[in-house]
Amino acid sequence: MKQFLFLLFIFLLLINQASHADNAIPEMMKTLNPEGTLIFDADHGQQMWTQEHPGKDGKSRSCTTCHGTDLTIDGKHARSGKVIKPMAVSVNQQRFTKTKKINKWFKRNCKWTWGRECTAQEKGDFLQYFQEN
Ligand code: HEC
């Protein structure tokens, strides 16, 4: 009986880990805000998401150019036309599972869209927005 309970305990521990390992947003936020001095704002995230910036090609671009304005449905890549899965965590559990992936795409997409990297405050605001929608 003791052995059984022990195995049950290990089993539950593993399930618990598997279901919690998937969202990396809390970990990202800690890295972006080590002192806890920043307050992340989903409304500001949403505002930046749709803000248009002049691109190198003369056309204006925003995050929605590829991801769309509704985070709960597919987006479409502006150049390749490829489908981009929804950004909202509520409908897409595969989102924001690895800090490495999040960092890579923030870097690439902020540069392409805004012509510069995003600040910690901006990244945190975006993540707050993705998480709440
Ligand atoms: C030129 C098209 C394009 C634009 C514009 C764009 N993205 Fe993306 N984004 C992508 C692609 C492609 C991926 C990777 C494929 C995927 O995860 O579905 C991605 C992934 C991401 C990810 C990683 C998601 C994850 O699951 O880890 C973040 C964060 C992100 N984008 C943020 C932004 C922000 C913020 C902006 C605006 C500043 C933006 N993107 C503009 C194409 C774009």
Image (spheres, rainbow, N blue to C red):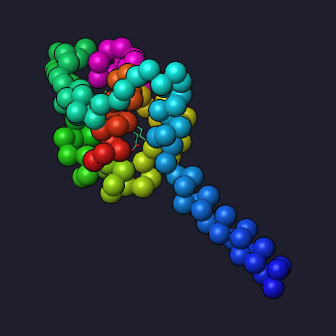
**Location of residue 3 (image quadrant):** bottom right
Q: Please tell me whether residue 54 is drawn above or below residue 40 in the rendered image.
A: above
Q: Is residue 4 visible?
A: yes
Give coordinates of residue 114: x percent, y percent.
29, 18
Q: What residue do we see at 49% from left, 48% from top?
A: 23
Q: Please tell me whether residue 122 is drawn above or below residue 24 in the rendered image.
A: above
Q: What residue do we see at 46% from left, 40% from top?
A: 25
10 relative position to 104: left or right: right
Which quarter of the figure is the N terminus placed in? Answer: bottom right
104 relative position to 113: left or right: right
Q: What residue do we see at 78% from left, 81% from top?
A: 4
Q: Is residue 76 visible?
A: no
What range of the chain is rendered magenta? 107-120
6 relative position to 94: left or right: right
Name the residue at the bottom extreme: 1
Nearer-the-camera pick, 132 or 64:
132
52 relative position to 100: left or right: left
Nearer-the-camera pick, 118 or 6:
6
Give coordinates of residue 63: x percent, y percent.
26, 31
Give coordinates of residue 44: x percent, y percent.
24, 28
Ligand 1 found in image quarter: top left
Query: Does 110 appear in magenta?
Result: yes
**Location of residue 6 (image quadrant):** bottom right
Magenta stretch prevailing secondary structure: helix
Nearer-the-camera pick, 39 or 111:
39
Give coordinates of residue 40: x percent, y percent.
35, 29
Query: Does 38 appear in magenta?
Result: no
Q: What residue do we see at 75% from left, 78% from top?
A: 5
